[in-house]
Image (cartoon, rainbow, N blue to C red):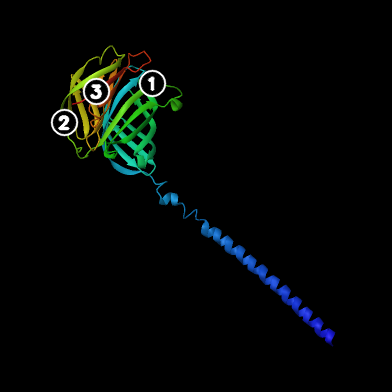
Amino acid sequence: MRRCWMLFLVLLFGLATLTGCTVRDDDDTTEDDDDATGDDDDSGDDDDAGDDDDGTNDPPVFLDSFDFRLVQLENQVTGQYDLIQGQMDIFVSNTVFLAELTTSTGQEWTWQGPLVLNESRFEVTWQMELPGVPEFWITIEGNFLAGADRVASQNCLTGLGNDNETLNQGDIGIGFAWYGCQVDAPAAAIDRTGSYSVGVTTHGDNCAGAWTTTGWQETWQFDGRLLVVSRGGFTGYGIVSDDGQVFRYSMLEQGSPGRTLKVIGDFTAPTGKEEAIATGYCSDNTSGLPGGVLDLDYP
């Protein structure tokens, strides 16, 4: 009788053990289901499509309308330098800069590319055409002009454009300076309107002596926020930073053969230092050197 009782206990214990294993398997299966569900929860790809949350994939939105000027710096196709003016609508996102330009003659171009928002700089590539030059690809690198205070302008941009050798399958030799300001932009902090007696130091002139001189007189005026500089019978266009200290302009001196002087300056340069550096361009220059290199001293 005792042996039967012991056998009964052994069988009962074994049954409990088997039953416990089965339950644990079900628990493990349940955990698998929980983990699988966690995959659904962690398809945080949907939540972390935070790309949308941080604006990475947001389309550009309208910033403002700008007046613009394009001043030719190079044209190896026809030798003709042109001034192109008009209005453009600017659209921006955290990563994209887009400009829809309409010239005074009715041409329309759309330029788009990446924007580095915290540095207020951009690079755009698209197509355009010029008189005697079939449609070609152009790339423009630019920025919203920072002042001497290192603060980027809220109102004006500048850039330099050159034909894109890769997309054009070769260098066609087109270049220009680009300036633009919001149509309703407020005046700069310092009004630079007036006449300036500019001292000139010429370090090189490969454009038939066009800039070999010791000085000249400039008159500065503003068309809205766009800078208009007059010298002799020439007119230049550019911009001044919001603090009124930093300036950029290019003066188209001759259409055909083309000749332009591009100026980059800062009124806060230390006393005794040049306030501006000028680079000359001309279609007759075959030296392989810059058309002109000048230091300009403003009073």
| Label 1 packing within 10 angstroms: few (<14), some (14-19), many (20+) | some
Secondary structure state at the residue bearing disc 2: loop
Q: Position of residue 47 (x, y in %)?
A: 46, 55
Residue furthest to the top: 208
N-terminal label among 3 and 1: 1
Dot 2 or dot 3, earlier in sequence: 2
- Seen from the viewer's position, the closer of residues 199 and 278 is 199
Question: What residue is shown with label 2?
Answer: 193
Neighbour class for label 3 at 10 Å: few (<14), some, many (≥20)?
Answer: many
Q: Residue at x 75, y 78 (%)?
A: 13
Compute the Cα span from label 3 to label 1: 28 Å
122 relative to 277 in the view: left or right: right
Q: Which residue is mark 1?
A: 173
Identify the residue shown where x is 34% and y is 21%: 74
Report, in whole angstroms, how far the alpha carbon at label 2 lies from the one at label 3: 18 Å
Give, as a three-letter code, the residue at label 1: Gly
Residue type at mark 2 is Thr
| Residue nearest the observer in this picture, 105 or 43 | 43
> Which is in the foreground here, disc 2 or disc 1?
2
63 to the left or right of 50: left
Q: Is residue 261 above or below residue 181?
A: above
